[in-house]
Each structure stands twice: as C-alpha cells, then as structure tokens.
C-alpha cells in the first residue's frame, strides 16, 4: 500500500470558518473543484452473548464517471465466514459476516475507499453528445416499488404538481418546487425516514426526512413519466459553501446517512435534485429561523436542482433489497448496517446499542 497523507477535515473546516467571508450563502458546486478521496471505516461489535449472529455492512457501489468512483473494500474481524456480497441484481454491495454460537462479541471492520467530486449540469441547453438512457435502465427507473407506487393518488398528485409544464425539464422542476413548498422536515422522524409515499399522500402529512421527501420527488417524477432514482449514501465531510446542515460535523459519521435523488433528462443525462436538503436548510441552518424566502435558502434551493456537493458518497440506488441469509424480509433500501442476533434484527438507527461506528477521513490521492 502506498503511503498516504491524512487530511484533517474538521480542523480545516474550523480554521476556514474563522476566515472573513467564509460563511457565505451561495451554494454552487462545480466539477472544477476537483476529485476528492475518502476512506470509510465501519466497525461492528455485536454483543452476541454467545448467540449466533450475522451482519451486513453496505459499501460504495455507485460507479458514475462524472462524480463517483468506488475503490477497494477490505474487511477483517473474528467472523467464521465473511465475504463481499451483492443484492438487487448487483446494484447493492455489502460485506456479509456470520458468527456461530459461542462467540461472546462479534467483531467486523470494513474499510472502503471512494473518489468523488462536485457535480453540476448546465440546464440552459441540452447536449447532443448525451446518449439515451438504456432501455432496461429506463424501465427500472420508471417502475413502481413497494413504497413508491406510481398510480392512484401518486399519479393524481403528479398531474397536479406538473400543471401546464410541457417537457421533462419543466415537469421535473415543477415537481421539485411542489415538494419543496408542500413538505417539511420533521426532526422527530427516526433515521432518514421510510419513504412510504402513498401513506404520506393519503394522510396529507408530507413530513419526514430525506428518505421520505426525496422518495416523494422520485415517485412523482416516475408517475409523470420521468426516470428517477434515490441514491442512498453518507455525508463524509463539511460543506465547502458554509452550510453546516449540508455536511458532516466530524470524522464520526455513524448518523450522517443521507439519500439524494436524480432524474434522467434527455440531452442532460442524470440530473441531481435534493428537495429534502432544501427543507433541512430551512429547519437546521443557523440561526434556525429561516424561511423559503431567505437568501441562504433560495441559494440552496436553486443549487440543489442540477448540482450536488462532493462531500457525500453513494452506496447504491436500489429499492426493495433482500439480504441473503436474513430472516427479516425485504428492506425498503440499504443505507445502514444491518445485523441479527439469534435471528432478531438489531436497531440499525441506534449505533451505540447495535453496536457500530462509522468514520470517514479524506486522504491525499
């Protein structure tokens, strides 16, 4: 292994925050900011008390030439068996480990590298060089899932949100604005939410976190005939644009999971869209009294349709994930480590009791 210099993210961010003009509102990611390399470590220590156990740790699997390059994954520990596995037709990758009865504490450490960067699409004009979306992929990203139906109230709401828009770009922007203006972030929602779109619409309660609000955007887009997908991942560094709510606050990122969304637009390719983060800025960005009319929110709202920051890594884009060997049935998505002790699922939203810790560090290329 080549020697690599570790960059201390939090110290750099703290220093930058003291400089004049650092806390600016403009949110403008650009690929010109260059590639960044991250090392992600997930350490699982299951309190098995002698019972049989197994764990599944998601690893980066989004290979997108413009912004994401998954690297090597290694793993170690005291498991009887461990291997790199996959689900959802190869869209999801994870390390699966098993321990027999008699192991007092099950230990697994998974280390992955990934290279990412800011991305931005110029939506002022389509590019003739953008190849059409593969037929099978187009069908996949238009299909309903268990929690993201595309008929009934979802289709009705999509028509309402789209209004008089005529092309896919106008329709997607209209749906994005509808979600931003109709929903809100609920800090009491556990984890990132569930993404049960039909229940949200039937109840009229359009609250939640990223897995709820971005799933709403994805389902409405699919219902409007626009290929769309959720990207499940993790914030790994502070935001370079002064937004405390849009970045990781330390190297410990056990609770920094975040899902983003994308739509496919002919002539533009996959386009980032994150209405959930607009609502996160409204709720959490200092001084925590912002509204949709504040400049900092307007900047984020404009930037988060068409661009995203490279301080986040993507695991996968799959719904309805069945983990091999699990007794728990299908998961709506895989963004958190999963484990079972004596066949009982552990609470992935409570890292200390599970127990696991995820850390991220930026490394020199």
Image (cartoon, rainbow, N blue to C red):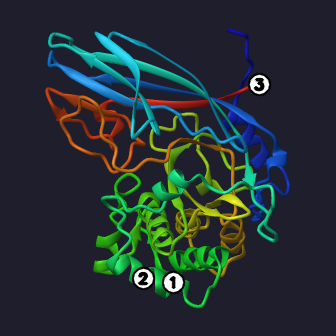
Density class for disc 2 (Cα within 10 Å; few <14, some 14-19, many ≥20) is: some
Looking at the image, do the residues carrying marks 2 and 1 touch, with CB atoms under 8 Å apart? yes
Residue shown at 35% from the left, 29% from the top: 56
Q: Indicate which label's residue lies in the foreground, 1 or 3.
A: 1
Disc sitting over residue 77 in the figure: none
* Residue labelled with disc 3: 365
Of residues 232 and 27, the one nearer the viewer is 232
Q: Earlier in the sequence, mark 1 or mark 3?
A: 1
* Residue labelled with disc 2: 157
The image shows residue 137, relative to residue 42, as above or below, that is below
Density class for disc 3 (Cα within 10 Å; few <14, some 14-19, many ≥20) is: few
* Residue labelled with disc 1: 161
Please state, as top left, top right, bottom left or bottom right, where the N terminus lies in the image.
Answer: top right
The image shows residue 320, relative to residue 59, as above or below, that is below
Q: Secondary structure at mark 3?
A: loop
Looking at the image, can residue 47 be seen? no
Of residues 230 and 9, the one nearer the viewer is 230
Residue shown at 37% from the left, 57% from the top: 193
């Amino acid at each position: 292994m080549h020697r690599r210099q570790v960059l201390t993210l939090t110290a750099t961010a703290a220093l930058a925050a003291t400089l004049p003009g650092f806390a600016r509102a403009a949110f403008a990611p650009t690929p010109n900011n260059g590639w960044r390399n991250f090392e992600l470590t997930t350490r699982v220590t299951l309190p098995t008390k002698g019972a049989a156990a197994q764990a599944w740790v998601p690893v980066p699997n989004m290979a997108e030439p413009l912004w994401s390059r998954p690297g090597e994954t290694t793993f170690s520990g005291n498991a009887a068996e461990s291997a790199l596995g996959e689900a959802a037709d190869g869209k999801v990758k994870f390390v699966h480990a098993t321990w027999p009865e008699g192991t007092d504490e099950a230990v697994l450490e998974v280390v992955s590298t990934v290279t990412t960067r800011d991305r931005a699409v110029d939506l002022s004009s389509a590019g003739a060089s953008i190849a059409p979306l593969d037929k099978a992929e187009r069908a996949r990203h238009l299909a309903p899932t268990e929690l993201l139906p595309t008929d009934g109230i979802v289709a009705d709401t999509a028509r309402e949100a789209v209004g008089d828009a005529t092309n896919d770009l106008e329709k997607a922007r209209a749906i994005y604005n509808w979600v931003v203006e109709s929903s809100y972030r609920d800090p009491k929602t556990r984890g990132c939410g569930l993404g049960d779109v039909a229940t949200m619409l039937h109840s009229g309660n359009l609250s939640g976190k990223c897995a709820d609000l971005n799933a709403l955007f994805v389902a409405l887009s699919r219902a409007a005939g626009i290929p769309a997908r959720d990207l499940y991942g993790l914030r790994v560094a502070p935001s370079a644009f002064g937004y405390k709510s849009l970045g990781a606050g330390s190297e410990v990122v056990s609770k920094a999971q975040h899902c983003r969304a994308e739509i496919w637009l002919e002539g533009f390719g996959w386009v980032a869209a994150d209405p959930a983060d607009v609502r996160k800025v409204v709720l959490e960005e200092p001084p925590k009294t912002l509204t949709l009319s504040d400049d900092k929110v307007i900047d984020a709202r404009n930037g988060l349709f068409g661009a995203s920051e490279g301080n986040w890594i993507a695991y996968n884009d799959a719904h309805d994930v069945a983990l091999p060997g699990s007794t728990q049935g299908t998961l709506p998505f895989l963004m958190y480590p999963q484990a079972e002790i004596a066949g009982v699922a552990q609470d992935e939203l409570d890292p200390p009791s599970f127990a696991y810790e995820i850390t991220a560090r930026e490394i020199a290329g």
